[in-house]
Image: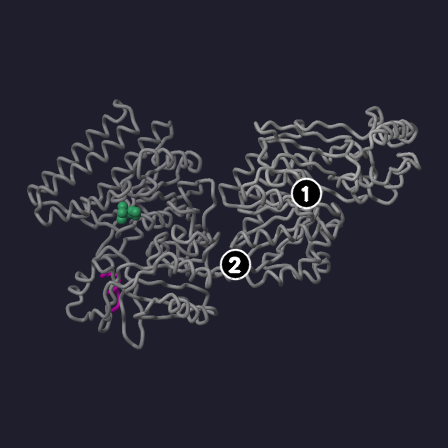
């Protein structure tokens, strides 16, 4: 049976609310036999370390204060999570343990690791109990019974046995992170932040399929997302780079975490317990992902030069200070980067072999693929100099470069570095669905567009899709001869195949461009968004879908910082959606939109002069290919009704299609029957139209078919699509046959409305409009 190990760190368990959130994740993601490894709640270990220090210093007052603080924290969690009765036994266990600690302190027999271990013991017990109260069968497991170590070496064979016999396959096993035991059963710890290591070790011993590290960030980013807004979350990072980042002190992954996964196929994921619906970063084996660029920062380090570092010494020192130590050789000498706080301990241990070269250093490390590192580190040096950062020490290796200074690297400098060095290499995978008229032109135009965007983005068309066949090429399809590649490599696919292929893509950004005429394709939008894809739609299906579905999609997009553009779904390439967004973003208030949003109806009404029956014009338009195969589809007005709905939603109005009144441009009975039935009664259409046209002429007006949306000062909305008698001489009356027009009245454009007019259909303008959406996307991803 496949098992999964989930690990929740202190920040995921920092309050009763967070415990409940974790329990929810466990409910949704775990099955019997899985393991949940926990750290101590919140900053408990830090507090216990302080408790230990006060004990060492024999500061009784401080000791008692801190012990009380620990007690209060645990009691508060218990009382917020459980009823009085349900917490009874946990409370008395806690009480006993606190008494034991106090007694041992008095007797001067307190033991450091045993004291620290309480943090994890408490959180495992608490979470297991919480799961039980939610009717999930779970029990807490003390890792001191699983992981034994002798003289600094884990006893793998024995531990594996212990894990296999103690992990209960009928329950969820909540295992303490961070702690282990020596051969005599004394508690030892695996080093600060060691719970990730506990999780991967356990996964190795029980032969788990995967490990999920649930933390407080969404995954592994190009740089610290709290400091740099444009930091990129990488969907995949290879183990070698992850390891290097960990050794360089990147906080998401810890130094030893990856070692138990070596030579295994265990998958490792980093994801956020705060946003469990978001896919995180997968740490993959070498070769399963491209190498990426990262910038990490350091604070408060001392640089120590060591005479002849002996084998295994760095490990011993790391263990001594409970912190990973980065070490490297330069010019034949060995260096250690040690947290300033621990320099004393390290120097003492080195007994005069350590020479402190620099103290209180800060700095950055650049991690990048080998072929880029030389150039990038030169660029980094230039940027740092421009930012007046004086470098005191640098070191570069085949896949990283260090820059150390005694100045602080503030977030502005970090952002500039990131912008210049990391963002340049940003990649977007483009998936184009629909290779009809517009789709083919769009693909043709891609070549030139991709070159143009190259400076800021590396755009790759990775997939072309028709309804049943696709050409999928993760490294990019060569656009100039896609037809040929299509003929030799395209394959049948199902929706599941497509989603699977998309999930495997290793790009920073992905965008689906929907140029299909298929509502089944837009049904997949939520799944695309789940795969972190941006969306560009050229059709109206999703934009006019029922409000619930639509609102959910918007919410889902927002949660994941994804964009959805659909500029061409109304007025093809005309910049109507841009104009509406711009007006609103700059503080204007739109009060009315009126216009003709159908090329067919525009052509019919503007061409009619009474010299021939209206139905003749309809048939002529049909023959020229201006209409839908059955022109009644156009005459029904439904297409304009949907476009008006999209515009209304762009204004933030919560409408559904039925909220827009619809008056067709034909007598209702003509909508029935087949096209033959229509032709037999076409004179009814002629009379219908002629009567209204004459009426318009009598009033000195023009007959047009329009959509109109009004918002009054109380926010009340009236929307209608139908026949309108417009002032002759007005922009709508003078419309060139076939063109679309949008007349926008707003606070600022009140007397004299803003008019956008031009061809609202055609493959070239539509394809160009989709490129405009794609361009917009690249600009907004910056
Ligand atoms: N609780 C331990 C610490 O704070 C272990 C961990 O969080 O992974 O270092
Ligand atoms: Mg922690």
Q: Residue 548, image x and y in percent?
A: 58, 31
Query: Which residue is disc 2 drawn over?
Result: 426
Question: Measured from the top left, where is residue 470 in percent x and y?
Answer: 67, 51
- Compared to residue 376, the image places residue 670 above or below, namely above
Query: Which residue shows up at 34% across the image and 41% down it?
Result: 12
694 within the magenta span: no
388 shown above or below 149: below
Give x and y (percent) for residue 277: 47, 40
Q: Where, by quadrant of the figure, is residue 526 drawn?
A: top right
Q: Nearer the viewer, mark 2 or mark 1?
A: 1
Question: Please, what secondary structure does the residue beneath circle 2 have?
Answer: loop
Compare marks 2 and 1 and give the one earlier in the sequence. Answer: 2
Say whether residue 205 is visible. Answer: yes
Q: Is residue 458 above or below residue 538?
A: below
Viewport quadrant of the N terminus: top left
Q: Is residue 256 left or right of residue 439?
A: left
Q: Residue placed farthest to the bottom in the image? A: 331
Residue 313 within the magenta-colored segment of the rendering: yes
Q: Determine which residue is flagged by label 1.
A: 569
Residue extending furthest toward the front: 751
- Residue 661 lies in quadrant: top right
Dot label at residue 769: none
The stretch of residues the image draws in magenta is 310-317
The local crowd at label 2, few if under 14, some if 14 to 19, many if 20 or more residues have their Cα within 10 Å, is many
């Amino acid at each position: 049976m496949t098992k999964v190990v989930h690990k929740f760190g202190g920040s995921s368990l920092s309050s009763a609310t967070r415990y409940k959130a974790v329990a929810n994740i466990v409910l949704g993601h775990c099955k019997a036999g899985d393991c949940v490894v926990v750290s101590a709640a919140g900053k408990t270990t830090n507090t216990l370390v302080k408790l230990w220090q006060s004990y060492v210093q024999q500061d009784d007052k401080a000791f008692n204060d801190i012990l009380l603080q620990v007690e209060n924290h645990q009691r508060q969690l218990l009382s917020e999570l459980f009823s009085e009765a349900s917490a009874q036994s946990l409370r008395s266990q806690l009480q006993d343990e606190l008494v034991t600690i106090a007694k041992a302190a008095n007797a001067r027999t307190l033991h450091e690791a045993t004291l620290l271990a309480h943090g994890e013991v408490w959180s495992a017990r608490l979470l297991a109990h919480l799961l039980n109260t939610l009717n999930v069968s779970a029990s807490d497991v003390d890792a001191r019974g699983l992981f034994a170590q002798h003289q600094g070496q884990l006893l793998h064979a024995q531990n594996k046995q212990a894990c296999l016999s103690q992990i209960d396959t009928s329950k969820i096993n909540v295992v303490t992170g961070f702690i282990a035991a020596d051969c005599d059963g004394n508690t030892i710890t695996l080093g600060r932040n060691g719970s990730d290591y506990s999780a991967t070790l356990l996964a190795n011993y029980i032969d788990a399929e995967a490990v999920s590290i649930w933390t407080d960030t969404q995954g592994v980013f190009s740089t610290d997302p709290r400091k740099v807004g444009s930091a990129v979350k990488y969907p995949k990072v290879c183990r070698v780079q992850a390891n290097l980042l960990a050794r360089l002190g990147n906080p998401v992954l810890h130094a030893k975490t990856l070692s138990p996964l070596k030579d295994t196929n265990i998958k490792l994921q980093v994801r956020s317990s705060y946003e469990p619906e978001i896919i995180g970063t997968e740490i993959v084996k070498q070769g399963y992902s491209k190498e990426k660029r990262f910038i990490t920062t350091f604070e408060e380090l001392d640089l120590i030069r060591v005479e002849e570092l002996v084998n295994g010494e760095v490990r011993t020192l790391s263990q001594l200070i409970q912190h990973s130590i980065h070490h490297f050789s330069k010019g034949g000498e060995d260096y250690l980067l040690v947290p300033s706080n621990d320099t004393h301990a390290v120097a003492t241990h080195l007994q005069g072999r350590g020479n402190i070269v620099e103290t209180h250093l800060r700095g950055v490390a650049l991690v990048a693929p080998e072929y880029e590192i030389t150039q990038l580190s030169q660029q980094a040096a230039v940027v740092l100099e421009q930012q007046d950062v004086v470098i005191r020490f640098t070191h570069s290796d085949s896949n990283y470069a260090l820059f150390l200074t005694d100045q602080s690297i503030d977030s502005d400098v970090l952002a500039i570095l990131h912008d210049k060095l990391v963002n340049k290499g940003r990649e977007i995978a483009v998936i184009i669905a629909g290779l009809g008229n517009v789709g083919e032109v769009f693909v043709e135009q891609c070549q030139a567009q991709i070159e143009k965007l190259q400076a800021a983005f590396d755009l790759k068309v990775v997939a072309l899709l028709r309804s049943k066949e696709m050409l999928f090429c993760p490294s990019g399809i060569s656009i100039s001869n896609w037809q040929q590649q299509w003929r030799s490599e395209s394959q049948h696919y199902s929706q599941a195949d497509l989603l699977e292929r998309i999930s495997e893509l290793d790009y920073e950004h992905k965008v689906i461009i929907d140029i299909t005429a298929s509502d089944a394709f837009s049904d997949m939008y939520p799944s695309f968004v789940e795969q972190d894809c941006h969306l560009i739609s050229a059709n109206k299906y999703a934009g006019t879908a029922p409000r619930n579905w639509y609102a959910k999609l918007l919410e889902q997009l927002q949660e994941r910082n994804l964009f959805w553009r659909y500029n061409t779904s109304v007025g093809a390439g005309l910049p109507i959606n841009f104009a509406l967004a711009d007006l609103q973003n700059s503080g204007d208030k739109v009060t009315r939109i009126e216009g003709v949003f159908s090329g067919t109806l525009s052509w019919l009404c503007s061409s009619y002069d009474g010299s021939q029956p209206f139905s003749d014009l309809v048939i002529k338009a049909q023959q020229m290919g201006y209409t839908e195969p059955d022109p009644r589809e156009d005459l029904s007005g439904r297409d304009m009704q949907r476009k008006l709905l999209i515009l209304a939603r762009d204004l933030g109005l919560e409408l559904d299609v039925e909220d827009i009144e619809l008056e067709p441009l034909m007598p209702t009975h003509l909508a029935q029957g087949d096209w033959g039935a229509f032709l037999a009664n076409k004179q009814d259409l002629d009379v219908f139209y002629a009567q209204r046209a004459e009426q318009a002429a009598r009033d000195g007006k023009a007959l047009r078919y329009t959509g109109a949306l009004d918002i009054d000062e109380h926010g009340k909305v009236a929307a209608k699509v139908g026949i309108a008698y417009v002032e002759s001489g007005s922009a709508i009356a003078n419309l060139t046959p076939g063109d679309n027009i949008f007349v926008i009245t707003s606070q600022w454009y009140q007397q004299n409305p803003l008019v956008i007019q031009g061809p609202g259909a055609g493959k070239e303008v539509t394809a160009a409009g989709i490129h405009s959406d794609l361009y917009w996307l690249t600009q907004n991803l910056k």
